[in-house]
Amino acid sequence: MTTFDAINTVYNLLKGLELPVFKYAKPGGNESEYIVINSLPIAGDVLQRCYVNVNIHVKDIVFPDSTNAPNTLRLEQLADTYSDLLKKNIVDNVHLYFDKQGVEREDALREHYINIRLLCNLLN
């Protein structure tokens, strides 16, 4: 199995829900909220492991003086919703386990995003 199997499994769990979901990178567009899924390299043989990142982006609140701040209310709502959904899932030979969660800043886009990191065990 490959990292594509891990990413496709997470993508299939999330597609069709509230937010648009993209693999690896977001193409152009004006979405103010969206999800990007990517992964770290895979290791192992019979039991392969990798980490899958689910990044949930939310536009910052922009103030009249052009400063911005994270939309913490919305980030918290989405963290609760998607963390619960991704806590533990087993789909065929792909086992997903919640590993870590944090919030990161994306200055260039004036966004913050929730990073949910999943440990993914792939059974060959």
Image (spheres, rainbow, N blue to C red):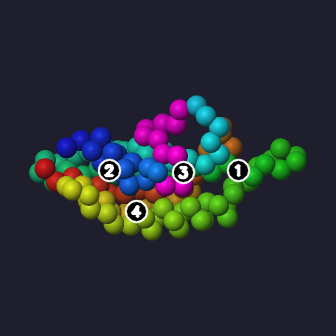
Query: Callout 4: 10 Å neighbours few (<14), some, many (20+)?
Result: some
In the image, which disc is placed on residue 9? 2
The vertical placement of 30 against 94, above or below, is above
Which amino acid, mark 1?
A: Asp
- In the rendered image, residue 56, in percent from the top left (x then y), is placed at 53, 52
In this orientation, which residue lies closer to the viewer: 42 or 74?
74
User: In terms of secondary structure, where does tag 2 sit?
Assistant: helix
Determine the secondary structure under disc 1: loop
Sequence-first tag of 2 and 4: 2
State which tag comes first along the sequence, 1 or 2. Answer: 2
Q: Secondary structure at mark 4?
A: helix
Q: Which mark identifies residue 19?
A: 3
| Disc 2 residue type (three-letter) | Thr
Of the residues shown, which amino acid type is indicated by label 3? Answer: Leu
Q: Position of residue 6 (x, y in %)?
A: 30, 48
Q: Main secondary structure of the magenta part?
A: loop
Residue furthest out toward the top: 28
Q: Residue furthest front?
A: 16
- Is 18 inside the magenta-drawn segment? yes
| Residue depicted at x 43% and y 64% | 85
* For marks 2 and 3 on the same chain, the one whose residue lies earlier in the sequence: 2
Task: Please indicate whether residue 49 sits to the left or right of residue 40 in the image.
Answer: left
Residue 42, quarter of the rendered image? top left
Q: Which mark is residue 86?
A: 4
